[in-house]
Image (tube, grey):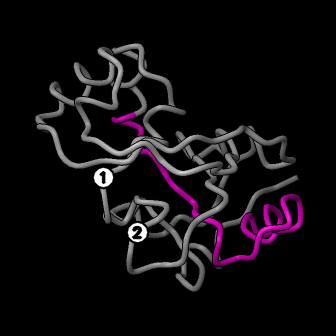
Amino acid sequence: MNLAKLIASETGAELDEIMLLRHTNVAANLLAQYGVTVEEYTLLQPVNSKYDFQANDRPAIEIVVAIVNDLVYAVYRIIGAPALGDTRTLAKPNYIAFDTARGYGPVPAKLFAAEALTSKATGRDAHGWTCPINPVARYGSQVFDGLEVLL
């Protein structure tokens, strides 16, 4: 079944309000090493980047599907306005150590509040991510339209 369409039917969100966000296996392993949650990594995003759920030049994202090790890890509903700051002032100490280990310095960021949603897709294999270089899939992209989960 198409992942985005399943999530839209479960949440009531429009397809252009859904983002599929694939975390690399390397990042996921490093998160675990530093004791950083996937949720914090998902919800702390650089301002106006392709990851920003409320970037100025794109439709606002209401639902984020986090994919880790090619499994649907979680489905989040973005709630409220994000906290503004940078990746040092908004992050917990473990996240700062993780970010530093990856060679990143502070950048303007938003920390989004979210609630985890129940989904039939959670824990399922996500098939069809054909462009591993681009970890973000939005409505209208080939990956977004082609990503499938087996229920």
Residue 63: image x %, image y %?
67, 58
Q: Please give the name of the residue rendered at 32% of the width and 23% of the height, measured from the top-left corner.
A: 95
Q: Of the residues shown, which amino acid type is indicated by label 2?
A: Ala
Tag 1: Cα neighbours inside 10 Å, few (<14), some, or many (≥20)? many
Question: In the image, what residue occupies the spot 34% across and 35% down?
Answer: 26
Task: Look at the numbered disc 1 and give the secondary structure of its residue.
Answer: strand
Q: Which of the numbered marks, if any, corresponds to residue 46?
A: 1
Q: Secondary structure at mark 2?
A: loop
Where residue 18 sits, quadrant-wise, is bottom right
Mark 2 neighbour density, 10 Å: few (under 14) some (14–19) many (20 or more): some
Q: Residue furthest bottom?
A: 140
Q: Give me the C-alpha separation between circle 2 and circle 1.
A: 9 Å
133 or 119: nearer the eye? 119
Q: Which residue is mark 2?
A: 55
Q: Residue at x 53, y 40 (%)?
A: 69
Foreground residue among 122 and 58: 58
Q: Is residue 129 left or right of residue 31?
A: right
Query: Magenta residues, as a range?
Result: 1-27
